[in-house]
């Protein structure tokens, strides 16, 4: 149940310096009891189609090779329970995103295969302990744009506002540090695909470091090797807990210029060249960046069919198999019924953005943004997006950086940070601090 702000509290949001704590100690006492430590409803649903949460997936499959970035599918022997397409979607309308329904309406061959639901998301114990403390200490301020009072935990396990829920997504646990070799593709309406980028992607999350003093919660770096015209190019992005004081710092190294430059355009609705300019920078990971251009409203929990435990799509397909005309090949994408938090973002009157409204669907078990519906300036559904989430059971952490964005007007789509044919995802010790300085890009970007 969502607790509404009082009138005084709502009016206070108008003041940039206002700060709001999450919940009372009495409300926080539900964590670890009727709620999981990160705020999900522990019980299953009444129909039995969503099971109770029992701690997530921590058993490592016997065929997993230690140190490998490729993860075997622990559910490879399962078959779909049923499928949904344009012919029967009206039976399940309340459990489909608007984007899913639009894909079914536009493409008769698009379907979702629904499997048994497995609540696989899991966390290291210290994060669960920290999250319970954060429930009563974390707070947003600057109108929800900034966050403080929590370290190495989910800040708002019992969210009261849309901003709090989105902070949970932005600071979701993805492991302390990871590296992956990736490819990104654009697929046109004829089914022809273009490799738009590829290279090495490194992530670092100071927010989950033992040192609680860092003002940054995320650092990411892409070192491009494909296609040839981008070989040697490097982009690095630093994001802070207080973006109103320390805004996004993005740096780019271009081999032809042989120097590092600040890149303020790597933000908001600037077209992302890694996807051929097809999607925006803040489409990344379904949402990535500052929330300053939208008002975020927490709508509530709902049950939805979403991509989940998508090990085949993420690790065990080829481009020929997965990247078919109009949409990902339904044979290789697993969908399950899960409870999600729905957050609606509306463009502020004084702000500019490609999208006028965005609806985000956040997994209650992991706080990963699993899907979004994004609307153009005429209020028409424009670009739905989906994450291909797979728990990395040996960490444990949820990996969801690989995502797909569809353009309903053009009938095209793009997929980013896909690792199935390039070695998967490896969790590593954090890079030294000097590796995250702008000067480090010069050496890493030399062809």
Image (cartoon, grey):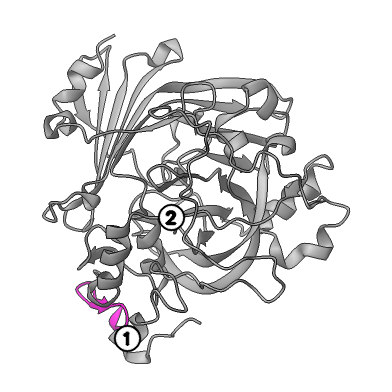
The correct choice, above or below, for 158 with respect to 211 in the image is: below
Residue drawn at x 69%, y 65% as measured from the top left? 49
Residue 110 lies, in percent from the top left, at: 78, 42
Residue 24 lies, in percent from the top left, at: 30, 85
Note whether residue 277 is visible: no
Label placed on residue 18:
none
Examine the residues drawn in magenta and state their main secondary structure: loop
Residue 146 lies, in percent from the top left, at: 25, 63
> Does the CB distance between marks 2 and 1 fall below 8 Å?
no
Give the residue pinned by disc 1.
Answer: 9
Q: Is residue 219 left or right of residue 156?
A: left
Q: Earlier in the sequence, mark 2 or mark 1?
A: 1
Q: Is residue 253 left or right of residue 112?
A: left
Give the residue pinned by disc 2.
Answer: 122
Residue 387 lies, in percent from the top left, at: 54, 45
Q: Which quadrant would residue 427 be assigned to in this image?
A: top left
Q: Is residue 191 magenta?
A: no
Residue drawn at x 38%, y 69% as measured from the top left? 37
Helix, strand or loop at label 1? It is helix
Q: Which residues are magenta?
A: 11-23
Which of 254 and 59 lies nearest the eye of the viewer? 59
Which of 173 and 244 lies nearest the eye of the viewer? 173
Decide: few, some or many residues near mark 1? Use Cα within 10 Å; few <14, some 14-19, many ≥20. Answer: few
Quarter that holds the C terminus: top left
Helix, strand or loop at label 2? It is loop
């Amino acid at each position: 149940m969502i607790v509404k702000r009082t009138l005084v509290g709502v009016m206070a949001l108008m003041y940039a310096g206002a700060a709001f704590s999450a919940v009372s100690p009495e409300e926080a006492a539900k964590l670890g009891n009727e709620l999981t430590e990160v705020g999900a409803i522990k019980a299953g649903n009444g129909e039995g189609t969503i099971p109770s949460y029992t701690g997530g997936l921590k058993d490592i499959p016997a065929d997993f090779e230690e140190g490998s970035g490729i993860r075997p599918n622990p559910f490879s022997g399962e078959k779909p329970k049923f499928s949904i397409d344009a012919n029967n979607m009206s039976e399940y309308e309340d459990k489909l995103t608007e984007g899913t329904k639009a894909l079914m309406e536009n493409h008769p061959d698009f379907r979702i295969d629904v499997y048994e639901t497995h609540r696989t998301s899991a966390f290291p114990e210290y994060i669960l302990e920290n999250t319970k403390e954060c429930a009563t200490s974390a707070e947003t301020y600057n109108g929800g744009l900034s966050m403080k009072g929590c370290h190495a935990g989910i800040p708002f396990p019992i969210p009261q506002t849309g901003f709090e829920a989105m902070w949970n997504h932005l600071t979701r646990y993805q492991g302390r540090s990871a590296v992956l070799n990736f490819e990104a593709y654009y697929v046109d309406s004829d089914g022809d695909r273009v490799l738009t980028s590829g290279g090495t992607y490194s992530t670092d999350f100071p927010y989950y470091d033992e040192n609680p003093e860092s003002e940054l919660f995320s650092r990411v770096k892409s070192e491009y090797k494909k296609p040839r015209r981008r070989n040697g190019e490097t982009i690095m992005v630093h994001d802070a807990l207080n973006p109103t004081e320390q805004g996004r710092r993005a740096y780019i190294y271009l081999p032809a210029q042989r120097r590092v430059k600040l890149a303020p355009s790597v933000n908001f609705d600037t077209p992302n060249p890694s996807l051929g300019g097809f999607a925006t920078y803040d489409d990344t990971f379904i949402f990535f960046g500052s929330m300053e251009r939208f008002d975020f409203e927490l709508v509530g929990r709902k049950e939805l069919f979403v991509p989940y435990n998508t090990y085949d799509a993420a690790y065990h397909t080829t481009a020929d198999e997965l990247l078919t005309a109009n949409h990902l090949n339904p044979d290789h994408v697993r969908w399950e019924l899960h409870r999600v938090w729905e957050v609606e973002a509306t463009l502020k009157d004084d702000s500019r953005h490609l999208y006028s409204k965005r609806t985000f669907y956040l997994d209650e078990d992991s706080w990963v943004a699993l899907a979004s519906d994004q609307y153009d300036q005429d209020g028409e559904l424009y670009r739905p997006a989906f994450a291909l989430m797979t728990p990395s059971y040996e960490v444990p952490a949820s990996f969801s950086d690989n995502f797909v964005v569809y353009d309903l007007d053009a009938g095209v789509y793009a997929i980013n940070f896909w690792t199935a044919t390039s070695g998967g995802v490896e969790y590593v010790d954090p890079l030294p601090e000097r590796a995250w300085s702008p000067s480090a890009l010069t050496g890493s970007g030399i062809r």
